[in-house]
Image (cartoon, coloured by chain):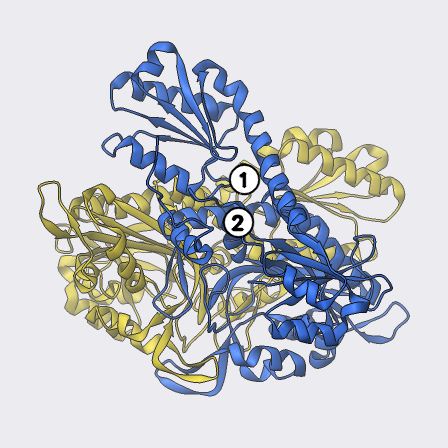
Chain colours: A yellow, B blue
Amino acid sequence: MAKAPVLTPRADDFPRWYQELITKAELADNGPVRGTMVIRPYGYGLWERMQQDMDARIKSTGTQNAYFPLLIPESYLTKEAEHVEGFAPELAVVTHAGGKELEEPVVVRPTSETIVNEYFAKWVRSYRDLPLLINQWANVVRWELRPRLFLRTTEFLWQEGHTAHATCEEARAFAARVQSEVYGAFLRDVLAMDFVSGRKTAGERFAGAINTLTLESMMGDGKALQMVTSHELGQNFAQAFRTRFLTQDGRQEYVWQTSWGSTTRMIGALVMTHGDDDGLRVPPRLAPVQAVVLAVKGDEGVLAGVRAIGDRLREVGVRVHVDDRTDVPFGRRAVDWELKGVPVRIEVGPRDLERGTAVLVRRIPGTKEPVAAGALSALLPGVLEDDQALLLEQSRRRREDHTVEATTIEEAAEAAAGGWARIPWATLGPEGEARLAERGVTVRCLVAADGSVPETEDQRGNVAVVARAY
Amino acid sequence: MAKAPVLTPRADDFPRWYQELITKAELADNGPVRGTMVIRPYGYGLWERMQQDMDARIKSTGTQNAYFPLLIPESYLTKEAEHVEGFAPELAVVTHAGGKELEEPVVVRPTSETIVNEYFAKWVRSYRDLPLLINQWANVVRWELRPRLFLRTTEFLWQEGHTAHATCEEARAFAARVQSEVYGAFLRDVLAMDFVSGRKTAGERFAGAINTLTLESMMGDGKALQMVTSHELGQNFAQAFRTRFLTQDGRQEYVWQTSWGSTTRMIGALVMTHGDDDGLRVPPRLAPVQAVVLAVKGDEGVLAGVRAIGDRLREVGVRVHVDDRTDVPFGRRAVDWELKGVPVRIEVGPRDLERGTAVLVRRIPGTKEPVAAGALSALLPGVLEDDQALLLEQSRRRREDHTVEATTIEEAAEAAAGGWARIPWATLGPEGEARLAERGVTVRCLVAADGSVPETEDQRGNVAVVARAY
């Protein structure tokens, strides 16, 4: 059956495909204030599932949730020099409130290191209070000149972790733990996304950090997306806010800190990683709806049949939705579910009912076959796990197939037209990094010779992963 | 054992007791910007439990979560005349962003009816799209001149539901359903809080609503607190934003809407309802920690003992925390847990270990008795349910004991010095309402003669519940 394309094909215009998919799958709309967005129920359902899973992982590190104010006195931002320099151009400033001009303007938080430190300085007294491990789920505002839904929005939702430790080593280990046990495991095991784990170069670090760890993934067009970051803040904010503690041997010392965040950008990453020309493909472990059971027609037997299948699938733990809106043409509904990327469709018409079969449509491998309706409950959990694995495998293969080992800056720049390049950092260095930047190519991260995250920027054998990026 | 009081007694200075409890139980701190607050992990843990429970109840009505932008063009607010009049004095306004003055100032949302309608007008086409049932968990900002932690804060966290329906009757029924099935059930069954359910007078309605339903509870000092509200918005916002739908017979009509919210104010209500001179008392069904097992001393047997008790309690579904910080004096830890209001403490010392006993301290009835350690798992679930019921009963009894049937405005005003008064609305009326307001007493709500929520303000037999309020 030939279908009119629902979306502009990716190969024709990737950005347009992305925008169309987000609109037609009802993930989000543009907000009225430039760069803001409305996250629609289907998109927000993805975010809720991400939050639930991440929140459990964050708590398993001993971190507790709290909530710090949205509005921060402007003076706080200026206490850490690099920090204010990094964020000043993006700030939204409240100058009037309660019908009056404010004596001191307040900024809408772009991130919370400053206000968190103001309170850590009050709460931390002695080594007994450390480590202090806090996370918050919140909205932040960074004025965005080139907005794109989910990827770069003026307001976005995120979690931001903030921790204080007694030693540099502890802080470093904690940032690395979050990066692998929380973020890395979540991306790989739930989002089915491959990534490279590395450290940012000095030029790409978070404003105020002494080191930034990053996970970078390859999108469907070969560009890179920074998925999540974890920062070692050293004692920079602690010194600015005098966040000190009494050591076991009676000295006052500044705490060592980390911060780390993941955002609604991950929804955009999901689209650009797993989406195809028919729409989104949602990894089964993430999917709010794993299987939709569609009544092809509205006769009573079919409606009873789809509901019974739905009930049986729920019993084996499948997140299922029964689509019995038979006043909407079947074809339109099928296309909608395809756009939304629900992993499995089970279609039941009058003839299926007679035969005791159903049509099983797997969105991820793109297969369609009749199965015995009675076999679905036994079949589906395995199908969903297989399709989860297939998405991860496709994501990994994409990166491997589109990553070039480059020996010169020229080679690296050329490779970055359609993928990534790996080039020895000793060959590139900060000077080469600047030359690549002129051509729109950035160092996404440095990885050690053995593929691990380097301890230092100039560790022998470091390789730079370079790419165009979102 | 005589104890030095940890808090100013309620009878001496209720507001001071409240402030001290919130600080010492580590629920929240004042934020740097006037009226804002930092919700500390223990306070936020209460909010997370509230969110989880409420979110499930909200979803069971068919409502889906979404997210609308924080920043709203100022012009949206002015589209509904009563709405802007109500909120203008409380708005925080962003005039500068991205290093420039904005062409049109944007407000930080005080509530989202306007921006929600902008999108409902796009999403709703025909009767098939109705009802549209949306909720969001978000922060809002209303500039507060007389802030008080949790009760009135410049920024607070809440959920706001927004729905659109084809008829006035459907909208009305939905608002009533949320009020009883979501809010009423949650307050009674989880927060263990008694309340009166009624409708607001015209003077006390939400800005832009045609009717506001409210649940009002009596605090420990006899004052009233508006716990949650649900509004029938009629077609006011629909007309302002042209939110219309095609009816089944082909006409264009404005939708009928509701909105409804519950906030972090509920944490303040919890404190003022169940708190006593020793601190908070958390209802067991809400409590993030239902039972804390304390090692009295740090010897190995005791530590192994408390951990074993903790494990066994977890197995029977009790949310348990093992307190083995034996480098902190036992007395101080006991006082801390009492302040935090954990329903049950289980104390184990070396002598208990010898005897195979533990000391069971129930925070809610205030009892303390030795029990066989092996019996705890069987005992505790019932104890927690009993104590949950006791809190609700105490809350109900307080209201009944401190509510006076008044026949004159003078009697009502006098009764409101230490409690509530009920007075026939036919006796009071809008004029009497204004006279009471001059004395700091407000009509909390109107209830029908049979105790139900009145259909109209001037329904025969309506009774006004009047009180001083937070």
Q: Quadrant of the C terminus of chain B?
A: bottom right
The lab-note entry on whether marks 2 and 1 share a chain reads yes
Foreground pick, A67 / B292: B292
Q: Quadrant of the N terminus of chain B?
A: top left
Q: Is residue B167 left or right of residue A385?
A: right
The picture places residue B31, in percent across and down from the top left corner, at 36, 64
Circle 2 sits in a helix, a strand or a loop, which is it?
Answer: helix
Residue B447 position by quadrant: bottom right
Q: Chain of mark 1?
A: B
Q: Which amino acid lies under the numbered mark 1 shown in the image of this protein?
A: Pro
The picture places residue A379, in percent across and down from the top left corner, at 64, 31
Residue in view at x 26 percent, y 53 percent: A258
Q: Is residue A164 left or right of residue A427?
A: right
The picture places residue A302, in percent across and down from the top left corner, at 84, 42
Instruction: Report the residue marked by disc 1.
Output: B283
First of labels 2, 1 by sequence position = 2
Q: CA distance from mark 2 to mark 1?
A: 9 Å
Instruction: Report the residue marked by disc 2.
Output: B270
Residue in view at x 74 percent, y 79 percent: B239
Q: Is residue B95 left or right of residue B215?
A: left
